[in-house]
Amino acid sequence: AQSVTQLGSHVSVSEGALVLLRCNYSSSVPPYLFWYVQYPNQGLQLLLKYTSAATLVKGINGFEAEFKKSETSFHLTKPSAHMSDAAEYFCAVSGSDFGNEKLTFGTGTRLTIIP
Amino acid sequence: DGGITQSPKYLFRKEGQNVTLSCEQNLNHDAMYWYRQDPGQGLRLIYYSQIVNDFQKGDIAEGYSVSREKKESFPLTVTSAQKNPTAFYLCASSPRDRGGNQPQHFGDGTRLSIL
């Protein structure tokens, strides 16, 4: 069984400030972890993914995430927020069920940028 | 450009009516997925298919049906048995990988409402 918990359904930061979106996972096997972004009335776009090659993963739009096994965390960060970062962000964990891969999503964090 | 096309973008259903949501991909992906998105609940898996002519129930399959007659197409029917169909529906696809490390690619969604 696998699950994802995103702490904070809403996060607000000032433009230029650090963005930190939290994600904790639970998995009975070594996990693959993903962050997706969703803009209003659109589908999800992949920001980055962790597949065990490196614990610090760099993604698009200046985002990065660090895999910490001891804390079962995969928090998303960006050093300086931009107005265009306002969106909803989803953390997801992948696991195999008899060879059928499925993603389990967190409930999402809506990021608001304050001018 | 390759991608996933969902149609229509907006759909209205009358009481007792079945409606079908279209999902077509030209990414040559083996696996396809249907999710339902409700505010504050993240994405929940309805059905998925790893190969043509085969599909499995996800976490909330009741009141829905699918078919997978072609690799490119994975239509979802919302039947009259689904009593609360109002939601945003997302289709996704991915290369098949038993390791589970392949990200899913999403369409732009269909918003279904009850008349």
Image: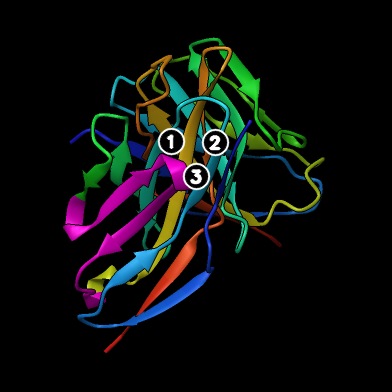
Give me the residue at 24% from left, 64% from top: A78
For disc 3, the chain is B
Report which residue position mark 1 lands on.
B92
Q: Quadrant of residue B23?
A: top left
Q: Are marks 3 and 1 on the same chain?
A: yes
Which span is picked out in magenta? A60-83
**Relative to the observer, which residue lies in front, A9 or B4?**
A9
**Relative to the observer, which residue lies in front, B17 or A33?**
A33
On whether residue A97 falls in the magenta region, the answer is: no
Q: Are marks 3 and 2 on the same chain?
A: yes
Identify which amino acid the numbered label 1 is placed on.
Answer: Ala
On whether residue A64 falls in the magenta region, the answer is: yes
A19 lies left or right of B10: left
Report which residue position mark 3 lands on.
B90
Q: Quadrant of the N terminus of chain B?
A: top left
Q: Quadrant of the C terminus of chain B?
A: bottom right
**Distance CA(mark 3)–CA(mark 1):** 7 Å
Percent x, y of residue B50: 49, 16
Q: Do the numbered discs 3 and 1 sit on residues whose CB atoms are within 8 Å?
A: yes
For disc 1, the chain is B
Q: Which of pointers 1 and 2 lies earlier in the amino acid sequence? A: 2
Q: Are marks 1 and 2 on the same chain?
A: yes
**Distance CA(mark 1)–CA(mark 2):** 6 Å
| Image vertical order of residue B86 relative to residue B99, above or below | below
Q: Secondary structure at mark 1?
A: strand
Q: Do the numbered discs 1 and 2 sit on residues whose CB atoms are within 8 Å?
A: yes
Give me the residue at 38% from left, 45% from top: A68
Report which residue position mark 2 lands on.
B34
